[in-house]
Amino acid sequence: MKNSLLIIAFLLAGLLGFAIYCWALIDWIQDYRTGIFARDHNEAIRDTGGILLYSYAGFRFLRSRTI
């Protein structure tokens, strides 16, 4: 029982992380299209850096699980 609750907790945490990543990516695309990044370079650096770091961490995690 305890093991199944732990698995459910990890699945929910993974889904939440993926939802946050998708939200950040959609926000990045909208900001790029509306030209916010041309006006506010700090936001462009923060948003792009956050997405790149999250993507890098995800790729490293998947790579460590497949090798």
Image (cartoon, grey):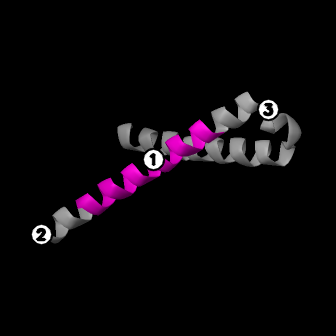
Q: Amino acid at mark 3?
A: Gly
Q: Earlier in the sequence, mark 2 or mark 3?
A: 2
Q: Residues within 10 Å of mark 1 (few under 14, many from 20)?
A: few
Q: Residues within 10 Å of mark 2 (few under 14, many from 20)?
A: few
- Residue position for label 3: 35
Q: Nearer the observer, disc 1 or disc 3?
A: 3
Left-right relation of 24 to 8:
right
Which residue does the image show at 46% across and 52% down from the upper left?
A: 17
Q: Amino acid at mark 1?
A: Ala
Where residue 40 sits: x, y (%)?
A: 85, 44
Q: Which dot marks residue 49?
A: none
> Disc 1 and disc 3: Cα gap in Å?
24 Å
Indicate whether 66 appears above or below 50.
above
Which residue does the image show at 58% across and 37% down from the upper left?
A: 26
Q: Earlier in the sequence, mark 1 or mark 3?
A: 1
Q: Which residues are magenta?
A: 7-27
> Disc 2 and disc 3: Cα gap in Å?
51 Å
**Element under disc 3:** loop
Q: Nearer the observer, disc 2 or disc 3?
A: 3
Q: Tell me the quadrant of the picture where the N terminus can be found.
A: bottom left
61 in the magenta segment: no
Name which quarter of the figure residue 49 lies in: top right
- Residue position for label 1: 19
Q: Nearer the observer, disc 2 or disc 1?
A: 1
- Residue position for label 2: 1
